[in-house]
Amino acid sequence: MASESAQSQNLHEATLQKLRSLLVEGKIAPGSKLNERELAESLNVSRTPIREAIKRLAADGLVELIANRGAIAVQLSLEDVIHTFDVIADLEGFSGELAANNISAAALSELEALQYEMMASYARRDLSSYYKLNLRIHHLINQAANNPVLSRLFSQVNARIEALRFRSNQDGVKWEKAVEEHQEMLDALKARDSKRMRKIMIQHVQNKRDVVVQLLEAEAATTTAAETVK
């Protein structure tokens, strides 16, 4: 009985992570409806874990539950995107500053190992793997700050822009810059330089914000031009 319960829990968690990846990687486009039946068929599960995953993703801010429409992949306005990135920049700057003061030797070693793996993904140009490792690094830095309230805020706000952070690395030059910034973060943590770490983290997020804003503005211009032709 306990074994069945564990299997069910593992299935629900695996379904959640698969659905999250589809949203973050843009395979389910912003504004699209999440069709439970189609998702259950494509992921080869029943509709129950799909329904549970959608509820959790809604709580995380990746999905909106709209009356008479169902679950919709969250679609932020340009203004929402800018405001959210500005908040995340301050949260990450603060967590980086605290982490430089509080990070343990074990956490620093884990961070180095993740950085090594992430660099390998970058060398392969494996964006999906790179992003997952990138997210783990950011969460580990946040946890090393040793402030549970900050960690909760970071997770809640960051969920809104996960898909956009993923897309910010699709430009080769910008991706290379992000990789360099991650090495600077590791160096600052090793040096226990809290002021430098705060500055790097804020700049890192602001650079991502600028890339995302350029992408969204370009897409909006393309859509407007296409509608004008019609």
Image (tube, rainbow, N blue to C red):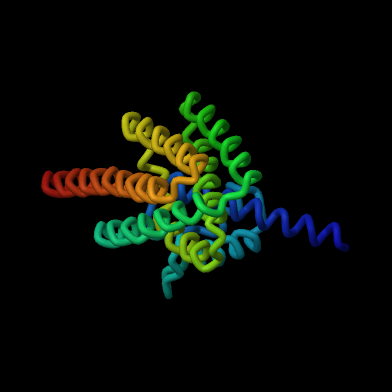
Give the residue at the far top of this rendering: 123
Instruction: Inspect this view and state whether residue 58 appears.
Output: no
Residue 136 coordinates in the image, percent (x, y): 55, 46
Instruction: Inspect this view and state whether residue 114 appears.
Output: yes
Task: Give the image quarter of residue 77.
Answer: bottom left
Say whether residue 183 is left or right of residue 177: right
Q: Quadrant of the N terminus?
A: bottom right
Give the residue at the far right of this rendering: 1
**Camera-side residue of 73 and 39:** 73
**Camera-side residue of 179 and 40:** 179
Task: Give the image quarter of residue 55.
Answer: bottom right
Kindly identify the residue that appears in the image at 42 percent across and 47 percent down: 197
Say whether residue 64 is left or right of residue 229: right
- Vertical arrangement, residue 47 with respect to residue 122, above or below: below
Residue 93 coordinates in the image, percent (x, y): 40, 54
- Vertical arrangement, residue 135 with respect to residue 148, above or below: above
Kindly identify the residue that appears in the image at 11 percent across and 48 percent down: 228
- Vertical arrangement, residue 119 with respect to residue 40, above or below: above
- Vertical arrangement, residue 58 with respect to residue 133, above or below: below
Residue 28 coordinates in the image, percent (x, y): 44, 50
**Camera-side residue of 31 and 96:** 96
Task: Give the image quarter of residue 120.
Answer: top right
Say whether residue 24 is left or right of residue 219: right
Residue 137 coordinates in the image, percent (x, y): 53, 45
Give the residue at the far left of this rendering: 228
Kindly identify the residue that appears in the image at 63 percent across and 44 percent down: 105
Number of callouts: 0
